[in-house]
Structure formats: C-alpha cells, structure tokens
C-alpha cells in the first residue's frame, strides 16, 4: 500500500494525506455508533485531483485484486446512517471534499448557483441571501453538512413540502466516475430530455457510484415575510386535517409543517427548562407551521390568523400561537430542533426515519404504537417529524427507569422488525431521508423488491465493476 500512499501524496501534497494521529473526526460517525480505521484521509483541492486520486486507487486495485483498497467519499460527516466513515479493515481511503468549497457561479437570471461539493450548506444559504435569493434546503446540521453530502444522501429537512428534497433542487452535476473520468454535467437546464437521467442516478447513491465534485442547484426569490405558528391538535388525524386546510388556504406559502408528539415536547421541557413553552403540554400532538409570503408581513399574518381561526372552528386545532417576531419564531423552531438532543439526554433509543402516505399516518401510528406496547409494556415513543412530507422520526425509548443500553441489546432487532414490517404493511419506506448507509443495508435487502434490488445491482456493476466506491453501503455486491 506504500506505493499507493506515495502516489496520493504526489497528487494532493503530503500535507493533505493524513495517516496517523487522531483521525476520529473522519473515522467516527456523528452518532458515535461506529469507529473505523482509515488507510488514509485524503483531501484533494480540485476536480482534477479527485480524478487522479480515484484513478490511482482503481489502477492499484486492479493490480492487487485482494488488497481491499476502496474509497469512502466524505463531506461534513453528519450522516445518520453510518455512510461516510471507513470500516475497520484499515484499507479504505476517506476522500474528504472539505477543501473544495467554492461557489463557482451564481446566475441570478437563471435562478441557479454552481457550487463545489465541499461547500457547507449554511454558507450556500448565506451566499444566496446576499443576492436576495433563497436556497431552500434547510436542516439542523446545516452549519456542518455539505452540498456533496446533501446530494449523496438526497437530504430532506424542513422545507421539502414546498421546495422538494436535495434531488428536486439539483439541475446538474460534475462527477468523477469510479474509473477516474470526469462527467461534466453541470447544466442549469430545467428541460433536457436527452436520454437516461444520469444526475438522478448519482443523487442519493451515497457515494457508491462516483464522487460528486460540483453541482448546479436551483434558487428561488426570497419571501418578503416568513411567519411561524405553533398549534395544539387533539389527534394525529386532526394534524392531517390541518395540513389539508393549510394547503388550501396558504397554497405555495406553506413552507413548513412539522408534527411533535406530547412526549417529545415533554422531554424538551424536562432537559431544557430554560426554553419557554408557549402552549400547555396537555395536548397529545402539536404542529409547527410556517407561512412564507411574497407580499407583506401584514398579508402573511392575516392569512395565517384566518387559517387558524378556521381550524379552531373546525375543531382540528384546540389552541394556537403565532410568533410575534423573528426571535419568537426562532424560539419555536428551536423547540422542534431540540427534540433529538433531549431524547439523547434521556438515554439511548432506537431511531427510525420512515415515511408513510400522509393519509395513512394516523392509522400507522395507532397500529404500531399498540404493537410495541404489547411487545414491550411501558415502552415510550418519541414521535415527531416532517408530517407535511409523510416523514416521521418514530423513535422508541426504554420504559421509564429501565437501563437504556440493556434495552437496546435486548430489543433493538425485535423493535426494528416490528416497526419496519408495519411500515411495509402501510406502503411506506424504511428510510425517508437519512439514507441506507451501512445501518440499513440488511433491512433494505429484506424490504426492497427483488426486481428493484436486481436493477440496483446491475447499475452498480455497470458503473463500478471493481466495487471501489463506498462498498458495503446501500447494497452488498
Ligand atoms: C443534527 C442533525 C440533523 C439532521 N437533520 C437532517 C434532516 O432534517 N434531513 C436529512 O435528510 N438529514 C438530516 N441529517 C443527516 C445529514 O446531515 C444529512 O444527510 C446531510 O445531508 C449529510 O451531509 P454531509 O456533508 O455531512 O455528508 P456525509 O455525512 O459526509 O456523507 C453522507 C453520504 O454521502 C456520501 N457523500 C458525501 N460527499 C459526497 C460526494 N461529494 N459525492 C458522493 N457522495 C458523497 C457519503 O459517502 C455518505 O454516504 C441530520 C444530521 C444531523 C447530525
């Protein structure tokens, strides 16, 4: 392997190939579920350097078929599916895109921006805002995650119901293939029917088909006003009814619709008592709504108040508050974003990022809650998520007072099977937005249809016959 490492140092410079010291920032996943061992962390600065690195690895692997050398592309390393860290073999190269962070071109008339893969999401949002434009992808990891990782994992977040996920925001890609060639596909075209959609193959492929080095993304006009409201709802069915009403009343202005179960909010109140709770926690569910308006704040507020009045009359809302200022709106979002941290402070839990058709969510939750209670009496459900997209973070916490680590050891497999079987019975997906990574490879093999898996394997074999790119993620080949 020494000759390969020498070659990589020649390509990117000795200062950008790390082989010893503390590499945990690249070797350990965000949730600290996995700590691998990299052959090296390599940090190229240009598309040409990425191509040379991949070619060097491909040639080395061809010459030494049993060496096990492979490449794990990495952006901000915030994957929640253990997709961006090396395994324990010591044979994988972490190819970090961190140094490729430039915004290459913002075309205001075409409403597009072309950006390198290592650009941090928040930096891109700010760059768009400087041009009075909106880049709408938004998620709690936005200060760390990168556009390459967002596209690699087809990230979702809080604005999907209006603007779509990372895939919907992407118009073109520049990709280094598994052979070290460069595909220049950075078109800013909204219409291009010239054969198979290669862009869509790479988006969501989690680094298993090639390395995204740059992307052309859509931009939108900045709204004139953005208002946030918190509503207490008597049931999940009422939350779904409120969503339908909000779609009708606000149209494209509805940019956020998050649901939070009572237990989720009670954990936030318990672990972050300094956060003010604007409503009593007596209701079983709460909804956070966002209205983006292209006229004025007065218009947005009157639309929002009309909607909530109608919802109160209809009975699908029992109480509601509209944020009076930007800082109050931020506080409401902060409550929502504090749920994952509050549940971590409460103890280890079994997480599920699932989607079900919105119309079936109330029945899915009722049925699955009952099955879990039957299987493990006293189990606690931290249920929240992007209801507007049919996406729930349906997490299962040990009964109060139980040893959380022991709970995971005893019940994780059974709970996953129970939840995923239920998701399948309700025509849902076992991974809504976090991807498959290595966490769900075996689940995918079980729940995806054999025909779909066969086509996915054929694509992998055609584009990466050496299985050089992020092996063991998404599919086993
Ligand atoms: C606090 C927190 C909140 C989150 N909230 C959300 C959320 O609301 N919605 C959501 O969808 N996700 C969420 N995530 C998950 C994660 O942040 C996103 O998936 C994010 O898009 C990953 O970006 P990254 O740059 O960190 O990618 P990484 O973690 O580095 O990589 C993710 C995957 O993409 C591949 N990859 C990385 N760069 C490239 C590239 N240039 N070319 C090809 N493949 C590449 C990696 O190999 C890996 O498989 C959250 C994570 C955290 C920690």
Image: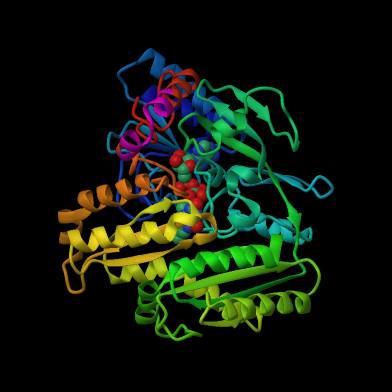
Q: Would residue 133 appear left or right of 374 to someone viewing this image?
A: right
* Residue 298 figure quarter: bottom right
Measured as percent of width and height from the top left, residue 5 is found at 41, 28
Secondary structure that dominates the magenta span: helix
| 447 falls in the magenta region | yes
Residue shown at 35% from the left, 75% from the top: 267
Q: Position of residue 370 (x, y in %)?
A: 27, 62
Above/below status of 169 relative to 2 = below
Toward the viewer: 416 or 459? Answer: 416
User: Is the image coloured rainbow, by chain, by secondary structure, or in one colour?
Assistant: rainbow
Please name whichever residue, 455 or 274, is drawn nearer the observer in this view of the structure.
455
Identify the residue shown where x is 47% and y is 35%.
207
Magenta-colored stretch includes residue 261: no
Determine the residue positioned at 28% across, 61% down. Answer: 349
Q: Which stretch is magenta?
A: 443-454
Where residue 299 appears, as percent x and y from the top left, is 77, 76
**Residue 204 visible somewhere in the drawing:** yes
């Amino acid at each position: 392997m020494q000759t390969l490492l020498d070659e990589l140092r020649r390509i990117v410079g000795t200062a950008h190939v790390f082989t010893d010291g503390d590499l945990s920032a690249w070797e350990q996943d965000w949730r600290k579920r996995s700590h691998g061992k990299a052959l090296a962390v390599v940090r190229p600065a240009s598309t040409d350097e990425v191509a040379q690195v991949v070619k060097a690895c491909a040639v080395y692997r061809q010459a030494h078929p049993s060496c096990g050398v492979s490449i794990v592309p990495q952006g901000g390393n915030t994957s929640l599916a253990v997709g961006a860290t090396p395994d324990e073999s010591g044979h994988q190269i972490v190819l970090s895109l961190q140094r490729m962070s430039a915004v290459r071109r913002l075309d205001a008339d075409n409403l597009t921006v072309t950006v390198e893969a290592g650009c941090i999401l928040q930096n891109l949002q700010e760059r768009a805002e400087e041009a009075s434009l909106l880049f709408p992808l938004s998620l709690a990891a936005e200060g760390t995650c990168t556009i390459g990782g967002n596209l690699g994992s087809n990230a979702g977040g809080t604005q999907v119901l209006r603007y779509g996920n990372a895939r919907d925001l992407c118009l073109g890609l520049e990709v280094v293939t598994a052979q070290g060639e460069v595909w220049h596909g950075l078109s800013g075209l909204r219409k291009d029917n010239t054969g198979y959609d290669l862009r869509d193959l790479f988006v969501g492929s989690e680094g298993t088909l090639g390395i995204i080095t740059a992307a052309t993304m859509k931009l939108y006009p900045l709204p004139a006003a953005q208002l946030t409201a918190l509503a207490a709802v008597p049931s999940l069915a009422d939350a779904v009814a409120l969503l339908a009403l909000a779609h009708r009343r606000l149209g494209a202005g509805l940019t956020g619709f998050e649901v939070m179960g009572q237990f989720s909010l009670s954990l936030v109140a318990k672990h972050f008592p300094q956060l003010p709770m604007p409503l009593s926690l007596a209701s079983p569910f709460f909804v956070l709504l966002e209205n983006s308006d292209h006229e004025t704040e007065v218009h947005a507020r009157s639309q929002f108040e009309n909607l909530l009045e109608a919802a109160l009359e209809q009975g699908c809302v029992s109480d509601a508050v509209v944020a009076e200022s930007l800082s109050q709106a931020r506080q409401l979002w902060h409550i929502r974003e504090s749920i994952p941290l509050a549940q971590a402070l409460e103890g280890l839990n079994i997480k599920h990022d699932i989607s079900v058709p919105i119309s079936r969510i109330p029945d899915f939750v009722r049925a699955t809650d009952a099955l879990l209670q039957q299987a493990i009496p006293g189990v606690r459900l931290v249920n929240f998520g992007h209801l507007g997209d049919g996406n729930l973070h349906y997490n299962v916490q040990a009964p109060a007072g139980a040893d959380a680590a022991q709970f995971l050891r005893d019940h994780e497999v059974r709970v996953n099977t129970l939840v995923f079987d239920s998701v399948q019975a309700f025509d849902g997906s076992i991974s809504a937005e976090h991807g498959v990574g290595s966490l769900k490879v075996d689940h995918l093999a079980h729940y995806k249809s054999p025909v779909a898996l066969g086509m996915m394997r054929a694509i992998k074999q055609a584009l990466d016959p050496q299985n050089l790119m992020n092996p063991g993620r998404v599919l086993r080949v």
